[in-house]
Image: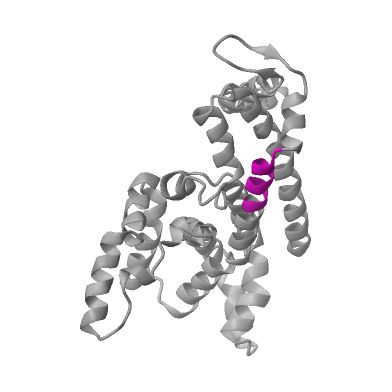
Amino acid sequence: MKKNIFVAYLLLLPFFTLFTIFYIVPLILCAYQSLFKVSVRGDVYVGLKNYEEALYDPFFHLSFLNTLIYVGLLAILGFIPLLLVFLLEMYIPYNSKFKKVFQIVTLAPWVITWVSISLPWKWFFSSIFLHWVEVVSSIIGSSMTITSYQNPLTTESSLIVIAFIQLWVYLGYNILILGAGFRSVPPEIIEAAQIDGASKLRTFFSIIIPAMMPYIVFTTITGLIFNFQIFDPIWLLTEGGPEWKSSSIAFYLVKQAKGWFNYGYASALGIIIIPVILVISLVQFKILYKRMI
């Protein structure tokens, strides 16, 4: 018995070693650095002043609010991958070529780097694309011109655009996980429900979704963490504009560190967001776990 326990811990040792080196140690160093004002002249100990500054920083408050809006929007739109899984699995044969092509197409944005993804979107909303819109509109007799259009990446709607792009990127990933969860449901249960006269919609909501709940919990929690850390599309498409209205906590943190070299304050912001994500994740997990049982 003791030998088996020793072997188990020995097998877990590589994971815990890497986890400690790349997560625990940086977290400790981040917490330590948050107590200093870091500059090229040397680090000055300031205690909790960086945390106090965050309490009165309007740009941090706006970035925090924007992050909550991102998380809220993407949580509301979270039914889309579940709906697509329902349509794919219930109405399209498993070996269908359409299903395979659809899965590849939707998964591609998640595999491709953010830089490669952002360039087409930037072009899509740019004046180059608008020139072709003007040409097409003149052909069909529309009165739309370039002057009547505003790039949504430079307006207050940029936040919604960024949320949509984030949803689009992770759509294929969520479909992949939820599709695996659907196929893990014993087919005998589905067949029994259909024999009893249950419709496909009733079977999906009453039988399949409860059986898929571990997968739904996984995609929901990981999605929450991904969305709280939203950074790449903001950095590449809007740079937080206009007037920080599309900024997020992750973007503002990196801007403080890499843009203004305020590493101590950026470390404090990173420490502040950790318990927020933890609490929301635990609440979300508890709510979903109740439905599992």
**Would you say 226 lies left or right of 145 here?**
right
Q: What is the quadrant of the C terminus in the image?
A: bottom right
At which x and y percent is residue 254?
A: 54, 34
Query: Which is the main secondary structure of the residues drawn in magenta?
Result: helix
Query: Number of marks in the image?
Result: 0
- Residue at point 59% right, 35% down? 253
**Residue 87 vs residue 6, the one in the foreground:** 87
- Of all residues, the one furthest to the bottom in this rendering is 197
- Residue at point 42% right, 52% down? 110
**Residue 120 vs residue 152, the one in the foreground:** 152
Residue 207 appears in the figure = yes
Q: Is residue 110 above or below residue 197?
A: above
**Residue 231 vs residue 285, the one in the foreground:** 231
At which x and y percent is residue 156?
A: 54, 60
What's the coloring here? one colour
Residue interval drawn in magenta: 57-66
Q: Is residue 66 above or below residue 18?
A: below
Residue 63 covered by magenta stretch: yes
- Residue at point 50% right, 30% down? 259
Residue 176 appears in the figure = no
At which x and y percent is residue 200?
A: 57, 83
Q: What is the quadrant of the N terminus in the image?
A: top right
Q: Is residue 66 above or below residue 200?
A: above
Residue 245 covered by magenta stretch: no
- Of all residues, the one furthest to the top in this rendering is 41
**Would you say 202 lies left or right of 183 here?**
right
At which x and y percent is residue 79?
A: 58, 68
